[in-house]
Amino acid sequence: MPLIFCFSKDVLAIHSRWRLEFLRYLNIFETLYSFERRATVLSETGLRERCRTLRKLRPKAANHEVATMTHPAVNMSVKPDVKGFFDEATNTITYVVKDPGSNACAVIDSVMDIDYAAGRITFSHADHVIADVVARGLELQWLIETHVHADHLSAAPYIQEKLGGKIGIGRNITIIQDTFGKIFNEGTEFQRDGSQFDRLFDDGDTYTVGTMPAFVMHTPGHTPACMTHVMGDAAFVGDTLFMPDSGSARADFPGGDAGVLFDSIQKVLALPDEMRLFMCHDYGANGGREIRWESTVAEEKANNIHVGGGKSREEFIAMRKARDAQLDMPKLIIPSLQVNMRAGQLPPAEEDGKTYLKVPVNKL
Ligand SMILES: [Fe+2]
């Protein structure tokens, strides 16, 4: 059973470096001794003491060992077939991930087309994905959202209606629903409990795609609900990382935190070096190269311009804050959030039978 930790906000904010180290070692401890579920409130001193004690118990745990022991479900011998579908309008990549042992598949981060100026939605990108699944005779079992996207609208319900499958997202969707439910002045009919989704994932949760085991790592920082999904030797990192020459995603949305994002990136980089990493976005290094969306843990550790080569947490936070202060709001953040917090559904029709998207004035 996973452990539950209750940290004070101060401990989380000020001592998260210790917290990460503590969690790494305690995860090993948990695997070795199968602790029962419990809640612990620790001071900084307590955290330091636990780290020292656990380090003595296992003084030279390499990152690879940590990842393997933290997530016993890592199985690099399972090599799913991964096909990416690039959406030029939003620079998003949708993935069809096929279980090598069966015809089952998952679709990760689908895209609905929108002409925001005209208020018109279509599904040409999603139709390409559907056509591929149908042409290969695949059975769609999961529609995964790595997070609540702010730059594109999900097409998950549209694809689900055609092909079936369950829509899953991180449990902290409830935080996003609460935050943006207020911003969009949603009424009580808008549920803030994540019930629009078929599955809410917690850190460490496992599921299967056909015969292929998959597990989930909570990787917040860009948003509170960000999850990395690991299937065999492939990890779908959402916006936790970008290609090595493009660094990382912003951490200035409500609930975002640069330090927490750095810690989440370390969790991803603690996976085996050969793990394939698939990005949710690529911008061609601002037009400097062709679009790419696949790297490895080893490549990111060595070359990522924001975290590679052993850059410190403090360096990362300073860089991220300076960069984020220069960024404009994503063009589609207003329609995206209204739709994506509803699992890709449009808001309910009004009394004329039509659906409307709001623009909150001076609230974002
Ligand atoms: Fe994002």
Image (tube, grey):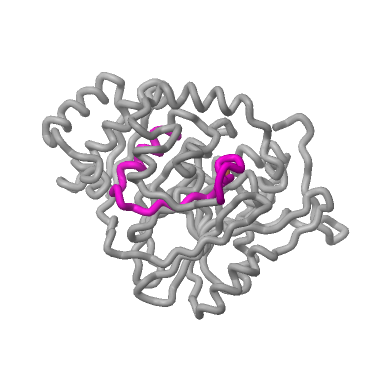
Q: Residue furthest left?
A: 57
Instruction: Tell how many labels.
Output: 0
Q: Is residue 242 above or below residue 200?
A: above
Direction from residue 43 to residue 135 in the image, left or right: right
Which residue is located at x 58 percent, y 28 percent? 324
Judge by depth and name the residue closer to the eye, 133 or 223.
133
Give x and y (percent) for residue 333.
68, 42
Residue that appears at 45% across and 48% down: 237
- Report the front residue among 162 and 283: 283
> Residue 269 in the image: x percent, y percent?
34, 42
Look at the image and say whether residue 334 sits in the magenta stretch: no
User: Which residue is at 57% across, 61% downward?
Assistant: 85
Left or right of 113, for residue 212: left
Judged from the image, the quadrant occupied by ligand 1 is top right
Residue 269 belongs to magenta span: yes
Say which quarter of the image contains residue 197. Answer: bottom right
Give x and y (percent) for residue 69: 22, 48
- Left or right for 121, reference 176: right
Taking depth in this image into account, of 20 and 38 the one nearest to the observer is: 20
> Residue at coordinates 57% horizontally, 30% vertically from top-left?
252
Against 68, residue 165 (above or below) is below
Quadrant (top left, top right, bottom left, bottom right) of the C terminus: top right
Residue found at the far right of this picture: 352
- State the image coordinates of residue 296 (x, y, percent, origin top left): 37, 49
Determine whether 175 is above or below 258 in the image: below
Q: What span is colored magenta in the figure? A: 261-290
Q: Quadrant of residue 186?
A: top right
